[in-house]
Image (spheres, rainbow, N blue to C red):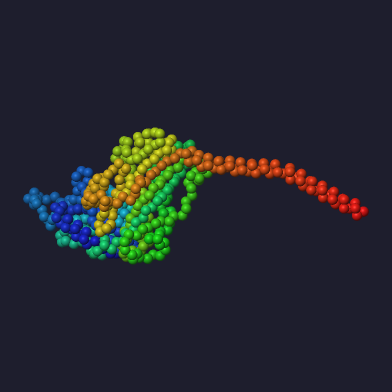
Amino acid sequence: MVKAVVGEESQLHLAEDRLSRSSEPAQVGLVIGKLNSALDRGFVFDLVPTPQNDAGQPACSVLEPAKDNKKKGSKSKSQTSDSSSNLVIDKDWVAEHARQVSRMMVGGIKVVGIYVWASEAAFKNSTMVLCQTVKGVAEAASTLEDDLDVRLLIHICYSPRRWTCRNCTLSSNITSSSLRPCDFKMGRVLTSLQTFKCLYNFDLRYMLLRLPIYQEKTSKSETLVDVLCNGISNYVKELQGAKAVIDGNLVVNDEACTTEGLHEVELLLPFMKDMYIEACSQKDVVGVVNFTGSLCSFSFLNSKEPISQAVADIKDDIIRSLGSRLDIICDEADEDPGPIDNGIKEAGNDLASEKPVSQLVLHSLRKNCNLSLPRRVFVPWLAGTYICDYLQPSETLEVLKDHCVELMSMEAPNDASKILEPEEEAIRVSTRSFWDVVIPYCSTSSSTQEKNIEITGKENSQKTSKSPSLYFVAAVIILLLSVLVGFVFVRKS
């Protein structure tokens, strides 16, 4: 549980002014920040309002009790704080907002809860629905480093005007004890953040195994996305065990970072087995999926956090970034079940482009398939920090601007030079059949064996050709020695 929370005063004051000028009796949105279990502290960077749903309705509204027509009319905000008023929240829409916003977060910046702008009475009458909303947001924006089973619920009351923060426990059974207060104050948080950057190159390969005959019709067909999701999940342990080098120094101690400026991070992983060679030794391999590319990651560290936290945030950001790209491909396929232009190419055949990537069954593919994943771009956010977005090969920066407005309620910079595009080439996925993998290695191996056999044969032939002459010379020498010895004995006698 978080004992104290510090919010960025500049951003929270802007949010308060925006809410006070609005005519809405209630509003719900996401809390962007960071929770640290080791420090028992939380940091709030900004509040992002949840936009209207597809039907044009607000995500949060106040349900007023029925009254007589005489008492109806224009109401001030103080009058809406009736003791029996309740909040009506579109929980699924808020969770979907959290899911999409979490994709735009980088290392050290996450969706850590929700805020609500409502009267005191409406808040107290709606604790159950608020806890359910917090839980939905936590599930939609989960991360690898979720070592805390709590999220934040910030209540901004307009009558009287005050801020309160509570821990919301993410238990299966939501009760009145799920909300517990914590200390909340405003201060300067963003200016003390330190920046870490990592360019990570990876080359992952996964083998496709032949299904037994009795399972070919009963088993669920394995798609390309299924293979990649399972591969990324298995890769988490290997990445978490990687050593880190920051600014040329190996991270060995859990110390604080005292130097200013941008810190370069390099991850060191142990050597992996060659999957192609391993595929040649397997009997049930039908193909190999190659997942390769270069990924850029940013992480922002609070001055009170140890440097190891920045490394953990970098690793978490790498895995989340790979998963986000796959989610975007699947989302677009679900929205448009027809052919989509996402960089799918099948050598010599266009059948692969007739289906979305989420529906490609690898065991049924007869030719190689190549796929380009969305590339990551970074947008300046607050006080030198960045958020990110993902663009398909056919998309431009205009799509990025629309996402910033819709999801983050912010304007993207008009100057394209301020948008970072460090990933020059898109991350690629390719599938290769068993024979495409084995034949090059087998041909290399067989040619090596033929050379060895040829060399060995020449050596043996040389040995066999030389052996008779050696025997003849030895026989002549022995004969001469015997004649010489006999001659000596005859003369003595």
- The residue depicted at 47 percent of the width and 53 percent of the height is 271
- The residue depicted at 30 percent of the width and 45 percent of the height is 391
Q: Is residue 119 visible?
A: no
Q: Is residue 14 visible?
A: yes
- The residue depicted at 48 percent of the width and 46 percent of the height is 275
Which one is in front, 13 or 24?
Answer: 13
| Quadrant of res 185 | bottom left
**Image height check: is 79 above or below 256?**
above
x then y, percent, for residue 250: 41, 61
Which one is in front, 423 or 139?
Answer: 423
x then y, percent, for residue 340: 32, 38
**Residue found at the far left of this picture:** 70
Quick check: 476 left or right of 448?
A: right
Quick check: 84 left or right of 493?
A: left
Which one is in front, 422 or 411?
Answer: 422
**Image height check: is 337 above or below 244?**
above
**Residue found at the far front of this picture:** 491
x then y, percent, for residue 282: 51, 43
- The residue depicted at 36 percent of the width and 50 percent of the height is 295
